[in-house]
Image (tube, rainbow, N blue to C red):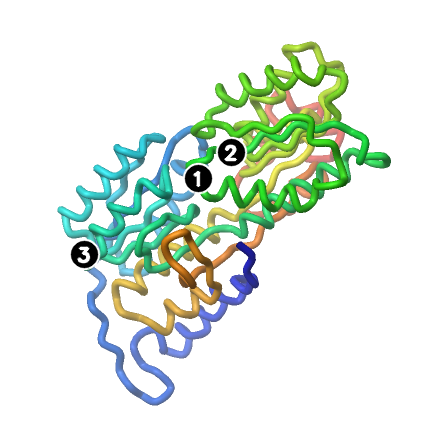
Amino acid sequence: MRRTVISLASSAMAVTLAGCGVVDGIGGSGTKASPTKGDDIKVGLLLPEKENSRYEKFDYPIIKDQVEKLTSNKGHVVYANAEQNAAKQNTQLQQMVDDRVDVILVDAVDSKAIASGVQKAKDAGIPVIAYDRLAQGPIDAYISFDNELVGEVQGKALVGALGSNSASKKIIMMNGATTDPNAAQFKTGALAELKDKVVIAQSYDTKDWNPVNAKANMEKAIAAVGLNNIAGVYSANDGIAGAVIDALKTAGVSTVPPVTGQDAELAAVQRIVKGDQFMSVYKSYPQEASAAAEMAVAKVQGRSIEFDALTRDKVSSPTNKDIPAQLVPVVDLTKANIEDTVIQDGIYTVKEICTASYKAACNAIHLK
């Protein structure tokens, strides 16, 4: 699935429209819109797991704060985390339908399994916006990062790290969960950069994105390929990267080969500072979460002009075509741009990154 990414303009356009009074119901012709709800709204938020720290630390609090801000503190978020259990998430969604929330943001544990729940919400007249992962079923909109671009950034970085004669060097591919449609897009994007440029000696999918499963797979890869024959590892996210690096070190590697990642988790940023992990992909969770809250509120309040401005991209799922979407850009995170990304955006402070164990490494790259 490829799309033209124009989402950077979307939020700016929404702000412009708000400044002109359009999103408050006054269009250029003076025609007044008819919002379906006022500010007293309930936004259901279903997040998939807690293994990745982003959901509890960034996504939920940012969406909660933004919904309150957009509704003069009259609206609120009803939150549930499925803890990587698809059946539990379906039960949580059903509860939100029963409780008559006004709109649902869902980051699906299993994109296919959630489809029946999405249909039930639709039947009950509750719009559903797929958040971060593209759920199946009749969703009204989708917001995420450009997932194929994520894979391309990872693959390109790995090839660059391998240097000359990369085409003869063996790498291991450690992909995400098959139940997550994003994982397939990461893989597609990565393969576009890796094909014919490296030797993919082994490739694994990681059940439930669980680092324990990733470490077991990496141990198999080491046994099959040989520790000293592994020139690099494509790792789909930072949790997997940590497990890969742990397995390599346990096996006795003298220098950790280039390992990719994604999500810019604190532990991963520290590994990058130290030199154990080559790179991660930084995704602006504040931008994604804030835009998701704006989309949810606009949808409920019938602000179609604002909603359209926030969803200027189009994507397709196995069950739906041309879904209105916003695709947020991503950044290659390395030692060179830590200050310009996660620190500048307020994700982490230098103090959080440069703890006692990493102080010397921070000093070496002038991160103070």
Label 1: which secondary element: loop
**Which mark is drawn over residue 123?**
3
Q: Return the disc, 2 or 3, that comes first in the chain's sequence.
A: 3
Comes first in the chain, label 3 or label 1: 3
Residue 26 picture quarter: bottom left
Report the residue at 37% width, 74% height from top: 305
The amino acid at mark 1 is: Asp
Q: Are marks 3 and 1 in contact (CB under 8 Å)?
A: no
The image position of residue 168, as x and y in percent, is 81, 31
Pick whichever, 177 or 75, lies toward us: 177
> Which x, y percent locates residue 222?
66, 16
Compared with 236, 283 (above or below) is below
Residues tagged 2 and 1 counted as in contact (Cβ below 8 A): yes
Quarter of the figure with residue 274: top right
* Neighbour tally class for label 1: few under 14, some 14-19, many 20 plus, Cα within 10 Å: many
Task: Return the residue at label 1.
Answer: 180
Taking depth in this image into account, of 309 and 354 the one nearest to the observer is 309
Q: Is residue 203 visible?
A: yes
Q: Secondary structure at mark 2?
A: loop
Residue 147 drawn at (x, y percent): 54, 48
Quadrant occupied by the C terminus: top right
Cα distance between the residues tagged 3 and 1: 25 Å
